[in-house]
């Protein structure tokens, strides 16, 4: 059989996916974190990998899924949070644009898996499966109640899961993980399709979402998940030393408030008293960039801006 006859769609996918292979897995394993620092890698969406100077490895919101893949259904799913927010039905043209930079099934050294909330681009069954199959049998899964419910439903043993709510602290080797208040109002309108929001909202944010502060010997990292802007960031900044902060950045289409704009990111960084504010780009390609995307370099032009890097 000739080469062109033996190649199939399945063989093509296996030979090209994930796009980066195990390159980043190997880089993370080989990284020697200098004393007084920590290392961080962006995994797409709000996903990050954090490594401390003591070699502690944790991942947060590592997502291995996709955005839209077909025009087959021109409408949103009934009850979708964006449908509830904007009162529209037409499908959002949001596609995943970031490559798959980390192979979950090549992960061997990891000390904790965390999720900020239960939207499927922040908690991933493939990551859970890979860690359960290939890593130490004591790696904890840490998140709010709704995330733990998902993990347990997928088959992660309940004793491997740690439910956190604002005020809780979990120690993982040399990293102290503080669960803090989240401000993800989009999460609050994520309800079952047959459930009406009237008379239900506001719901309990603490069981749905948390922000995290990672205190390491080399500095402190604040992860805000998909939180919107809130004046409460100032409370977190008053109560904790924050060296680097991550915010979910993007412009909002008409009728939608879901991401922090450049001004919101700067206000967040200022309120947190952070040394560096990092705008995590919105996870999707959106058809109308004039409405949904702005050049993050604009943040460097704002008056009184902290150091912003991207």
Image (cartoon, rainbow, N blue to C red):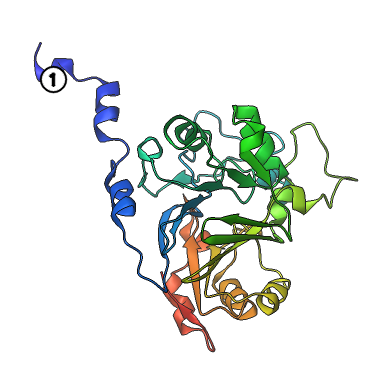
Q: Residue at point 72% right, 48% down?
A: 208
Residue 223, image quadrant: bottom right
Q: Nearer the viewer, residue 189 or 224?
A: 224
Rendered location of residue 174, percent (x, y): 51, 61
Rendered location of residue 66, percent (x, y): 46, 39
Rendered location of residue 298, percent (x, y): 46, 77
Q: Nearer the viewer, residue 159 or 195?
A: 159
22 above or below 205? Answer: above
295 above or below 281? Answer: below
Where the C terminus falls, by quadrant?
bottom left
Q: Is residue 33 visible to the viewer in this orientation of the structure?
A: yes
Left or right, 111 with reference to 120:
left
Q: Which residue is mark 1?
A: 4
Q: Is residue 88 visible to the viewer in this orientation of the structure?
A: no
Q: Nearer the viewer, residue 215 or 282?
A: 215
Neighbour tally class for label 1: few under 14, some 14-19, many 20 plus, Cα within 10 Å = few
């Amino acid at each position: 059989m000739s080469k062109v006859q033996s190649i199939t769609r399945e063989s093509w996918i296996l030979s090209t996916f994930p796009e980066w292979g195990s390159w980043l897995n190997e880089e993370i394993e080989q990284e020697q974190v200098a004393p007084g620092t920590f290392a961080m890698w962006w995994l797409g969406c709000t996903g990050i990998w954090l490594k401390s100077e003591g070699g502690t490895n944790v991942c947060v919101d590592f997502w291995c899924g996709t955005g839209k893949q077909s025009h087959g259904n021109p409408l949103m799913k009934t009850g979708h949070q964006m449908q509830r927010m904007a009162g529209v039905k037409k499908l959002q043209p949001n596609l995943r644009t970031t490559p798959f930079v980390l192979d979950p099934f090549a992960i061997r050294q990891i000390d904790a898996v965390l999720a900020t909330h239960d939207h499927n681009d922040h908690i991933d069954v493939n990551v859970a499966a890979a860690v359960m199959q290939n890593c130490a049998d004591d790696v904890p899964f840490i998140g709010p109640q709704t995330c733990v419910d998902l993990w347990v439903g997928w088959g992660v043993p309940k004793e491997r899961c740690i439910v956190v709510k604002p005020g809780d602290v979990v120690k993982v080797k040399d990293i102290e993980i503080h669960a803090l208040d989240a401000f993800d109002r989009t999460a609050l309108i994520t309800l079952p399709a047959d459930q009406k929001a009237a008379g239900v909202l506001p719901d309990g944010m603490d069981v749905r979402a948390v922000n995290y502060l990672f205190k390491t010997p080399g500095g402190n990292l604040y992860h805000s998940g998909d939180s919107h802007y809130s004046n409460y960031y100032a409370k977190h900044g008053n109560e904790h030393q924050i060296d680097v902060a991550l915010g979910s950045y993007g412009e909002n289409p008409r009728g939608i408030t879901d991401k922090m704009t450049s001004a919101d990111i700067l206000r967040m960084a200022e309120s947190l008293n952070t040394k560096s504010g990092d705008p995590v780009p919105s996870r999707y390609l959106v058809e109308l960039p004039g409405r949904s995307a702005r050049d993050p370099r604009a943040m460097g032009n704002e008056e009184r801006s902290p150091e912003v890097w991207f």
